[in-house]
Amino acid sequence: MPAADLLLAISQLAVALAGFSGLIAAIRTAAPDGWYPRDIWSLSWMLGASIGALVLSLLPLWLDLFGWSDETVFRISSAVAAVCIGGFVGVMAWTGRRLTRAGFPPRVRYFPATIVLLLGLASIVMAVGAVGGLRGSITAAYVGTLIALLLASVLVLAVFLVLLARMTQRRS
């Protein structure tokens, strides 16, 4: 499988990002203000996207062990990715909307909509790949979707770091 090295590299990055989730959890738990409801929601985005990238990057490698063609492996992987990412985006968007209605608006404007759009489009691309609509580009689209998951996780990390800097600046 020609993309095997790239898939393994993505899985390693995903593990590193998941580790940052733990670090953020430790820092926020130690903060005197405690957790803001949107912080938990954002941490769920970061952890879900990074663990999703990890699992989905290893899936084609496992399926390849069955001896199937690369197209079959990536079509099955795309179907799984479409369902998992689509479900994740749906749940997170619904939860975010409930938080907003409960009086906890997003701390960074347009951020949730950007992540929903990015991963929603990735889910749609994976659905198209699963039904055979991408033909020779399915591997590139699959890897691109994994990169989108990593990007979503990195964006959430950046928001956490900005909020942490703001909190530290206010105390000084």
Image (cartoon, rainbow, N blue to C red):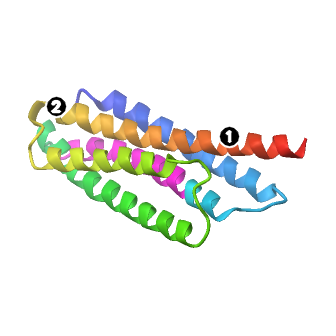
**Residue 98 within the magenta-colored segment of the rendering:** no
Q: Is residue 161 above or below residue 102?
A: above
Q: How many other residues sit within 10 Å of disc 2, few (<14), some (14-19) or many (≥20)?
A: few
From the viewer's side, name the closer residue of 56 and 42. 42
For disc 1, the marked residue is 162
Q: Which residues are magenta?
A: 44-66
For disc 2, the marked residue is 137
The quarter holding residue 118 reads: top left
Viewer can see residue 152: yes
The quarter holding residue 106 reads: bottom right
User: Mark 1: which secondary structure?
Assistant: helix
User: Mark 2: which secondary structure?
Assistant: helix
**Residue 47 within the magenta-colored segment of the rendering:** yes
Q: Position of residue 165 (x, y in %)?
A: 75, 40
Q: Position of residue 116 (x, y in %)?
A: 40, 51
Q: Position of residue 11 (x, y in %)?
A: 43, 39
Foreground label between 1 and 2: 1
Viewer can see residue 69: no
Q: How many other residues sit within 10 Å of disc 1, few (<14), some (14-19) or many (≥20)?
A: few
Q: Amino acid at mark 2?
A: Ser
Q: Tell me: 167 left or right of 121.
A: right
Residue found 36% across the figure and 40% down from its top: 146
Sooner in the amino-acid sequence: mark 1 or mark 2: 2
Q: Position of residue 51 (x, y in %)?
A: 46, 50
Q: Amino acid at mark 1?
A: Val
Mostly what secondary structure, the magenta segment?
A: helix
From the viewer's side, name the closer residue of 72 and 170. 170
Residue found 24% across the figure and 26% down from its top: 2
Q: Is residue 89 above or below residue 19?
A: below
Q: Is residue 98 above or below residue 93?
A: below
Q: Tell me: 1 left or right of 113.
A: left
Residue found 46% across the figure and 37% down from its top: 151
